[in-house]
Amino acid sequence: KAGVTQTPRYLIKTRGQQVTLSCSPISGHRSVSWYQQTPGQGLQFLFEYFSETQRNKGNFPGRFSGRQFSNSRSEMNVSTLELGDSALYLCASSSWSPRDTDTQYFGPGTRLTVL
Amino acid sequence: KQEVTQIPAALSVPEGENLVLNCSFTDSAIYNLQWFRQDPGKGLTSLLLIQSSQREQTSGRLNASLDKSSGRSTLYIAASQPGDSATYLCAAILSNFGNEKLTFGTGTRLTIIP
């Protein structure tokens, strides 16, 4: 069974631009969560989608948004990029909501660099 | 504020030794706790998941325990190998009035010395 895939793997943008990252969960998984990882803040939760609905959201500004499609694939968008948005963005999928004690499986991440 | 803490931030041990990594969390109302490893520049690999009703889980040379009353979890690695070198992260889903999410510790960077 294929794992979680994320595209693109690397991205370089300039301040003020916007970016869209994509995540394809493991087949059959309905929950997709997004995380931001930086050296200073560690891994922080962005949001979780389950069956096309946002079920949970972390403490990030409205510039960060996401959505989930009927096939469970998910995208996240960051508008008006700032230097501080440079990070590794990780996507994770699970069968149900992570709260339902199910293992989360992570993708390799998208490395975003904002210049 | 709900927090997950890992100490130490870095650990070096000779190959073959047994070792313990520590994780503490602030809320005993925990749904589950998961241990991951992360290799440099890579995503996270799930190692063990302990549900709130469980005390420990084992997989090969790894054993994870959960003590809700003290707010602690440990990851025991037996007979360490150079391939175990990585950053180990614990993450807990803590009760938060329907807004539960996976909260990560800052990780322990483990180096196994051949």
Image (spheres, coloured by chain):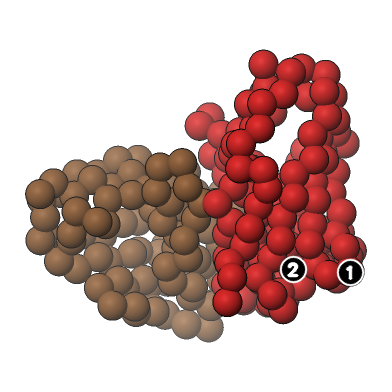
Chain colours: A red, B brown
Please name whichever residue, B97 or B87, is drawn nearer the observer in this view of the structure. B87
> On the image, numbered disc 1 is attached to which residue?
A70
Q: Quadrant of residue A71?
A: bottom right
- What numbered label is drawn on residue A112? none
Residue at x 25% of width, y 73% of height: B61
Look at the image and tell me whether residue B67 can be seen. Answer: no
Q: Are marks 1 and 2 on the same chain?
A: yes
Residue at x 51% of width, y 51% of height: B43
Q: In which quarter of the image is residue A104?
A: bottom right
Amino acid type shown at disc 2 = Ser
Question: Which secondary structure lies at badge 2?
Answer: strand
Q: Residues within 10 Å of mark 1 (few under 14, many from 20)?
A: few
Residue B75 pos. (x, y %): 33, 64
Looking at the rendering, in which quadrant would you find the C terminus of chain A?
top right
Amino acid type shown at disc 1 = Ser
> On the image, numbered disc 2 is attached to which residue?
A31
Q: How crowded is mark 2: few (under 14 residues within 10 Å), some or many (20 or more)?
A: many
Residue A81 pos. (x, y %): 78, 24
Looking at the rendering, in which quadrant would you find the N terminus of chain A?
bottom right
Q: Is residue A35 left or right of residue A30?
A: left
The residue sitting at the bottom extreme is B53
Circle 1 or circle 2, nearest the eye = 1
Q: Do the residues labelled 1 and 2 touch (CB within 8 Å)?
A: no
Residue at x 76% of width, y 72% of height: A30
Instruction: Check the residue under mark 1 and report the chain it is in.
Output: A
Q: Is residue B20 left or right of residue B103?
A: left
Look at the image and tell me whether residue A107 can be seen. Answer: yes
Residue A51 vertical position relative to residue B92 in the rendered view, above or below? below
Q: Quadrant of residue B56?
A: bottom left
